[in-house]
Image (cartoon, rainbow, N blue to C red):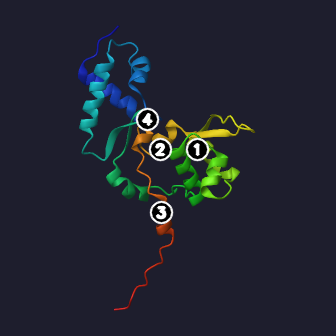
Amino acid sequence: MKTIDDLALKKLIEAALFIADKPLTVATLKEHLLVDYKVSSARIKLAITTLIADYQDRGVELVKVASGYRFQTHQAISADLGHLYKERTPKYSRALLETLALIAYKQPITRGEIEEIRGVAVSSYIMKTLTERNWVKIVGHKEVPGRPSMYATTKEFLDYFSLNSLAELPELMPISELSLIDNLTPIKETET
């Protein structure tokens, strides 16, 4: 086994995280990148902690998400960077976002339970879109007649929304307040 000094270790981990097409874990770095080196997990974690500090005040940052560590643009400037791209972020319907939110907050949940809460049918297109994006997956079947599929979110869902776990989801607004928002009437501007 070869040895590697701390600076070289940090550079190698930085380069691997930079070129990776998905987040990398400490275990992945140790087993695949540093397979020829004698490096402890503690040293890898220390190098990552140092890199996080190094990138704290830059345009990109090293963050931990559910699937590991990745570089991403700093949230404070991400909106400004959107002007560089001709392709726009896909617009998702309110129905799709409501369905995704119900799955995230109530998982595991069946399609029938989602429909009962929303009061309308969930289209096959919505479920297809969520599964194709790999934001939700079938995690089992409910032990009732018909054995409907139960849905839950995936690590890709957490990664996309820069979350480490579901515990980081914002607190739900009470239903009574949601209905107040829907019933607001627009304020008419007065001429001055």
Whether residue 135 is visible, yes or no, is: yes
Dot 4 falls on a residue whose secondary structure is loop
The amino acid beneath tag 4 is: Ala
The amino acid beneath tag 2 is: Tyr
What residue is disc 3 on? 176
Between circles 4 and 3, the one closer to the viewer is 3
* Mark before the other along the chain sequence, 4 or 3: 4
Locate the N terminus by quadrant: top left
Whether residue 128 is visible, yes or no, is: no
Between circles 1 and 3, the one closer to the viewer is 3
Dot 3 falls on a residue whose secondary structure is helix
Is residue 24 rendered to the left or right of residue 52? right
* Mark before the other along the chain sequence, 2 or 3: 2
- Circles 2 and 4: CB distance less than 8 Å? no
- Circles 2 and 3: CB distance less than 8 Å? no
Is residue 176 rendered to the left or right of residue 114? left
